[in-house]
């Protein structure tokens, strides 16, 4: 049945979306490495950090270089949800100050979590 669907019903341009040899790690890193638009690159923060740890320095440099501009321009994709996904260390000190005390409490709560205080 799948073969019939695939051969006769599925649009040929979409057939490659059914499989990929790309690993999950490469897919996660691809948000940042394969895109030039900030709105696409920022999606790297939706992925598990361990999958993009090898490019973490580049992501950190990019967010620090652009954060003030994003705050000033307020692009439509730069939402509270996106901002909340970005770890504190990827936001400049000035950016964290502008985000206010609620962001600081969230960050300190993460640092003092039950899992981080184990001996």
Image: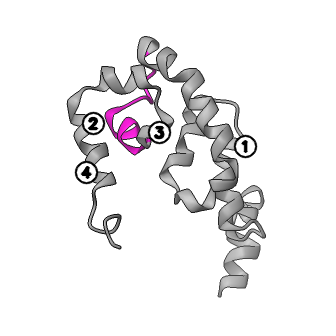
User: Which secondary structure, mark 3?
Assistant: helix
Mark closer to the chain start, 4 or 2: 2
Q: Which mark is residue 104?
A: 2
Residue 80 in the magenta stretch? The answer is yes
Of the pair 8 and 46, the residue shown nearer to us? 46
Mark closer to the chain start, 1 or 3: 1
Mark closer to the chain start, 1 or 2: 1
Mark closer to the chain start, 3 or 4: 3
Q: What whole-number distance in Å separates the C-alpha atoms at marks 3 and 4?
A: 14 Å
Q: Position of residue 33 (x, y in %)?
A: 73, 43
The residue that label 4 is drawn on is 109
- In the image, residue 9 sits, relative to residue 41, either above or below, namely below
The magenta-colored residue range is 74-86
In the picture, measured across the screen, residue 44 lies left or right of residue 111, that is right
In the picture, measured across the screen, residue 89 lies left or right of residue 107, that is right
User: Which secondary structure, mark 1?
Assistant: helix
Mark closer to the chain start, 1 or 4: 1
Q: Which mark is residue 33?
A: 1
The residue that label 3 is drawn on is 89
Q: Position of residue 68 (x, y in %)?
A: 48, 17
Query: Dot 1: within a 10 Å radius of its alpha carbon, few (fewer than 14), some, or many (20 or more) residues?
Result: some
- In the image, residue 116 sits, relative to residue 45, either above or below, namely below
Residue 63 picture quarter = top right
Q: What whole-number distance in Å separates the C-alpha atoms at marks 1 and 2?
A: 30 Å
């Amino acid at each position: 049945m799948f073969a019939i669907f695939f051969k006769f019903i599925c649009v040929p341009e979409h057939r490659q979306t059914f499989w990929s040899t790309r690993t999950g790690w490469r897919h996660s890193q691809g948000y940042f490495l394969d895109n030039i638009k900030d709105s696409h690159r920022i999606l790297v923060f939706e992925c598990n950090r361990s999958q993009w740890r090898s490019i973490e320095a580049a992501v950190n440099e990019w967010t620090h270089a652009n954060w003030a501009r994003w705050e000033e321009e307020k692009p439509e994709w730069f939402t509270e949800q996106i901002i909340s996904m970005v770890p504190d260390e990827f936001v400049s000190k000035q950016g964290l100050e502008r985000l206010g005390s609620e962001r600081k409490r969230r960050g300190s709560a993460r640092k003092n979590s039950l899992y981080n205080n184990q001996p």
